Amino acid sequence: MTADDSKSPYAGLAAKVRPEGSRDAQAQAKERAAREPLLWIALRPGLLDWLPCRVLVDGQPRGKLRSGQRFEVTVPAGRYSLQVASGWLRSPAVNVEVQNGDIGQFVCHGHDSTLDFLFGLVLLYGVLLPGRFYWLKPFKR
C-alpha cells in the first residue's frame, strides 16, 4: 500500500457497496455502544515502587494502584475529574468526558526517576509543589 490510497482503483469501493458497513460491524458497534464506559489508568514504573497510589474519580477514592499496574473502573457516561494521589503527593486533576462504549486511557508519570533524584526534582516537587508530583497523560494507540 502506498501513502496515498486515494489513487487505488478500489478506494471507496466498500463505502459504495455497503455505506452503513457490514452486518458484523453494525452488530459490534451496537454492542459496544451498549457497554458502560471504562477508565483505565496505568502507573509507569519508577524508583518509588513501594509507594501505592490512590485513584480519585471526582475526588472520591475508587481504588489503589502500584507501579507497573493498571487500574480499571466502569463508570456511567458523563464528565469526570481524575487524579492520582499518594499521601500528600498528587497529580493535577484531569477532566475527561466519556460516553457509552468509550475507554478513557491514561498513563500516570511521576517525578521519581533516577534523573529526578539526581537533579533534586523529587525534593522540589515533594516539598514545594506536591500537587504536581504526578501527572496523567492520555494514552493513545
Image: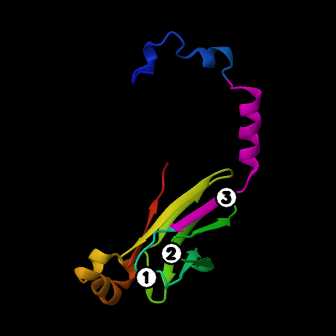
Give me the residue at 67% from left, 57% from top.
37
Observer-side mark, 1 or 3, equals 1
The kind of residue tagged 2 is Ser
The stretch drawn in magenta includes residue 55: no
Start-end of magenta stretch: 20-42
How packed mark 3 is, by other alpha carbons closer than 10 Å (few <14, some 14-19, many 20 or more), is: some
What is the crowding at mark 1: few (fewer than 14 residues within 10 Å), some, or many (at least 20)? few
Q: CA distance from mark 1 to mark 3?
A: 34 Å
The kind of residue on which mark 3 rests is Ala
* Helix, strand or loop under label 3: loop
Relative horizontal placement of residue 119, taking residue 51 as reference (left or right): left
- Is mark 1 in CB contact (under 8 Å) with mark 2? yes
Q: Which residue carries the number 3 mark?
A: 77
Q: Which residue is mark 2?
A: 67
Could you tell me which quadrant the N terminus lies in?
top left
Q: Residue at x 73, y 39 (%)?
A: 28
Per the image, the residue denoted by label 1 is: 48
Magenta stretch containing residue 21, yes or no? yes
Residue drawn at x 49%, y 48% is 141
Query: Which amino acid, by three-letter code, is at mark 1?
Result: Leu
Q: For numbered disc 2, what is the local secondary structure?
A: loop
